Image (cartoon, rainbow, N blue to C red):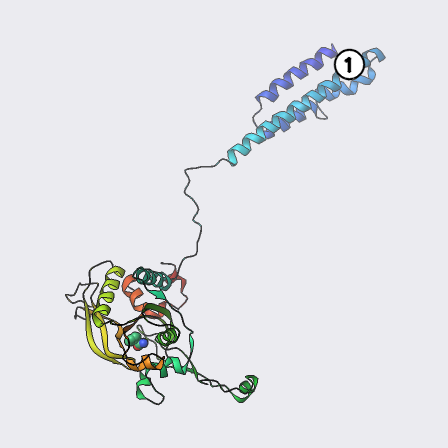
């Protein structure tokens, strides 16, 4: 009789466990079938009243059934848990991805890379020079002598000359030029390159420049220039005009007209201002070009023979053209930026747009 009771409990328990769908349900079943107040526990407690013979028979059965029910509940719990995991860890492959923030190039770097690509594809090499420049390369070698009023055209940040203590540290050796400056243009790279190389060559020299002047929407104390220098036996202004037109048509991806106007720079003779037809109105006249149809791009000219002499070339042996323009100006035209000061402002709302 007792044996039958135990087996019945087992059958009921197994049925209930199979039907149970939740962890809570299984917990309740454990209480119901194996808990202190359960029918099964009562049976176990009553075993002590049985005869020795019966004890031997029922005892192991009761224990075995208790163990089985416990295991069935455990297994059922495992299955339910793994189902829950499947639910919560399921991946929705159609969900929109999370955007990962990546770094990017500064607009000036983008423009500079593009300029370099166009020039190198035309056979130009890239030259480099220091941002802290000697007075000789910044001015004298470029036919801008000391105390000459032409120097006023470049508002220069001069660095303090060496003091006595520094000179002593330099073993009292005199230095070629005590005076150093933050270079106010990239033209010193012309002289540096020519001192080391023999024509013919074509180079570009991009780089940072500095001017000691008040800032406004089109002037900044720190800016970038782009120098081009082509020297050979018979380089003439026609070569310059062609290279200029080709470069700007490629940069703005449209056919542009170019115009040279007479100008003055100590290191070029003759000198020009270089204009391109307005990239916005195509030359008809608009607010960007102040109704003139033209945009001023930079200074240029045929390299002054005095500069050739200063770098050690014989006078009238070579001819070449030099050209300098502002990288910010091009970036501003390309991206329609109306204030040059934004480039180095460090304002991420501006930078993040590129
Ligand atoms: N270096 C000149 C400037 O910054 C520009 C220039 C370069 C002019 C080369 C002529 C030739 O104003």
From the viewer's perspective, tell me whether residue 255 is left or right of residue 207: left
Q: Residue 259's image quarter?
A: bottom left
Residue 55 location (% of width, % of height) = 81, 14
Identified at 34% across, 87% down, the residue is: 145
Residue 254 seen from this side: yes
Q: What kind of element bears circle 1?
A: helix
In which quadrant will I find the N terminus? top right
Residue 168 location (% of width, % of height) = 56, 87
Residue 220 location (% of width, % of height) = 35, 74
Residue 221 seen from this side: no
Pick whichever, 314 or 271, lies toward us.
314
Give the residue at the far left of this rendering: 284
* Mark 1 lies on residue: 58
Pick whichever, 189 or 215, lies toward us.
189
Identified at 65% across, 15% down, the residue is: 11
Pick whichever, 56 or 41, lies toward us.
56
Residue 228 location (% of width, % of height) = 31, 70
């Amino acid at each position: 009789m007792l044996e039958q009771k135990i087996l019945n409990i087992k059958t009921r328990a197994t049925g209930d466990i199979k039907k149970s769908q939740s962890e809570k349900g299984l917990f309740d079943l454990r209480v119901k079938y194996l808990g202190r107040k359960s029918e099964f526990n009562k049976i176990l407690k009553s075993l002590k009243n049985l005869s020795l013979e019966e004890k031997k028979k029922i005892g192991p059965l009761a224990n075995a059934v208790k163990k089985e029910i416990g295991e069935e509940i455990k297994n059922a719990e495992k299955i339910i848990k793994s189902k829950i995991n499947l639910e919560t860890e399921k991946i929705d492959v159609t969900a929109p991805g999370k955007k990962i923030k990546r770094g990017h190039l500064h607009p000036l770097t983008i423009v500079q890379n593009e300029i370099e690509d166009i020039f190198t594809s035309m056979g130009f090499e890239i030259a480099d020079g220091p941002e802290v420049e000697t007075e000789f390369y910044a001015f004298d070698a470029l036919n801008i002598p000391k105390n000459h009023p032409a120097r006023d055209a470049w508002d220069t940040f001069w660095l303090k000359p060496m003091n006595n203590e520094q000179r002593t540290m330099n073993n009292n050796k005199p230095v070629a030029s005590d005076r150093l400056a933050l270079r106010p243009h990239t033209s010193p790279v012309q002289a540096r390159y020519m001192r080391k190389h023999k024509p013919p060559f074509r180079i570009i020299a991009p780089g940072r420049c500095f001017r000691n002047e008040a800032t406004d929407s089109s002037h900044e104390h720190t800016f970038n220039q782009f120098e081009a220098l082509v020297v050979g036996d018979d380089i003439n202004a026609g070569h310059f005009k062609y290279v200029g037109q080709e470069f700007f048509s490629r940069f703005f991806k449209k056919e542009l007209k170019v115009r040279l106007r007479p100008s003055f720079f100590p290191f070029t003779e003759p000198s020009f201002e270089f204009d391109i037809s307005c990239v916005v109105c195509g030359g008809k006249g608009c607010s960007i070009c102040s109704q003139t149809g033209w945009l001023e791009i930079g200074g240029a000219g045929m390299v002054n023979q005095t500069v050739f002499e200063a770098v050690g070339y014989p006078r009238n042996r070579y001819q070449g053209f030099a050209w300098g323009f502002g990288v910010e100006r091009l970036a501003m035209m390309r991206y329609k930026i109306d204030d040059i000061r934004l480039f180095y402002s460090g304002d991420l709302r501006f930078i993040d747009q590129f």
